[in-house]
Image (spheres, grey):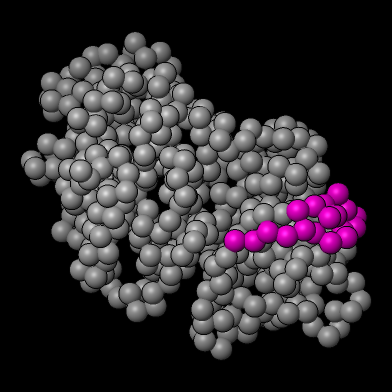
Amino acid sequence: MPARAVMVCGTSSGAGKSFVATALARWYARQGFRVAPFKAQNMSNNARVVADGEIGSAQYFQALAARVVPDVRMNPVLLKPESDVSSQLVLLGRPDPGLSRLPWRERAGHLWPVIEESLRSLRADVDVVVIEGAGSPAEINLQADDIVNMRVAEAAGAATLLVADIDRGGAFAHLYGTHQLLPPRQRALIRGFLLNKFRGDPALLAPGPQDLEALTGVPTLGILPMWRGHGLPEEDGVFDAHSAGGEFRVAIVAYPRISNADEFTALGSLPGVSLIWARTPAALAGADLVILPGSKHVAEDLGWLRAAGMAAVIGDRVRANGPVLAICGGLQMLGTRLLDPHGVEGAGDALGFLPLTTEYAAHKHVAPFSGAFGALAGFWAPLSALTLSGYEIRHGVTTAEARAASGLNPVLRDGVGWQQGNILAVYVHGLFENAGVLRALFGHDVPSLDDTLDGLADFLERHVSPDRLRALLT
């Protein structure tokens, strides 16, 4: 028999779909079921490397929650925004330039067969599939072309949960309106409401849940309290101005096309560290460490750095030998030139702080990484000889220029890491997901990922009856 399916939809982006789906995946896995996650189409610049390419980070972590190996079927379509009006379309782990160029509404017919087959294949392998929707299932302007919400629920016969962020206000109206905008056959799949991010006395909610059930026939299955420190990366890249309190200030430059921002989640939870998402020069002032993260469009983000006055402040910091970490696109920005013979991201001058030239290749390099640092100096000396695991997702191929003989030190194999002064520039994502790196640089550990995922399942079980969770499978 194909697997039973439970789907998590939301009344909006940021309602908590990824959080709930991840908790469900671990909870069902702990009940002895073989579980797999699924999201038909994800739009995010947070991605992880799997055997056949890349998938959205949320489904990667949901697979780990389910205790299975992540694979491309779990997120067959990944959209990686490159501007406000264009995205790179990744199909079954690999970029598809032809589909990327198609208008939005013309894609559905090409994508649905792949989505349907991925879902069918997963359901044949496991007992339970936990499906995550996108945005809201009641976007009536998009329903005719839906390939990620209720069309998927119908294909899987999924018991569907609808989650609302009550901290925003208007949660009962959001739940009722979403339910009512669905056609009757899809309404019939909604098995329960969840109120997420609640602060205050739950008794004050009455008679809201009871009245909502009287209007819709759908019970409110649970009220999930606000929990900021759960440790799961934010799917939609929602940045707090200060993610943690501490004397050591880390400023991450949050340019418009930032990518893989989820890799800093562990860093933001370290004792003694204050994590700041910097969008102005003032936010960089007084930082003990400045990080230039990945970028989905380096040339565009370089223009933003210059226009916002950030490039000048970064230059002052480099000249003062202040610690700087540059990752992937950040590494390319600190070099001298960007060459783009295939029209991938755009050519031009970089910031010129490192003697490195980057040329964009036509094909994306997507691979896991494992290797040891060479000898490092200054702020980065504690990482010397430390083994690092992570992942690479990039078009750029970077080489050291002839004048690099003075001061530029290759510190990782295969041309993926250099140090000059107190600048460490690497192509490897996931540096701070290595416990050894956190101990070496900051002297602290964070809970293991497995402990974090168990914590999500424990939290869900405290606030939603296990009998109700099991009943979703019947």
Q: Please determine whether, in this image, residue 73 is positioned above or below residue 126.
A: below
Q: Which residues are magenta?
A: 368-387
Residue 374 lies in the magenta stretch: yes
Q: Position of residue 347 (x, y in %)?
A: 60, 83
Q: Quadrant of residue 223?
A: top left
Which residue is found at the position 28% from the left and 73% from the top?
A: 103
Residue 405 lies in the magenta stretch: no
Q: Count of labels shown?
A: 0
Which residue is found at the position 60% from the left and 55% from the top?
A: 254
Q: Position of residue 34 (x, y in %)?
A: 36, 39
Quadrant (top left/top right/bottom left/bottom right) for the N terminus: top left
Q: Nearer the viewer, residue 452 or 162?
A: 452
Q: Please determine whether, in this image, residue 32 is positioned above or below residue 360.
A: above
Q: Nearer the viewer, residue 84 or 384?
A: 384
Quadrant (top left/top right/bottom left/bottom right) for the C terminus: top left
Q: Please determine whether, in this image, residue 180 is positioned above or below residue 303.
A: above
Q: Is residue 440 visible?
A: yes
Q: Please determine whether, in this image, residue 363 is positioned above or below residue 460.
A: below
Which residue is found at the position 72% from the left and 72% from the top?
A: 414
Q: Position of residue 142 (x, y in %)?
A: 21, 57
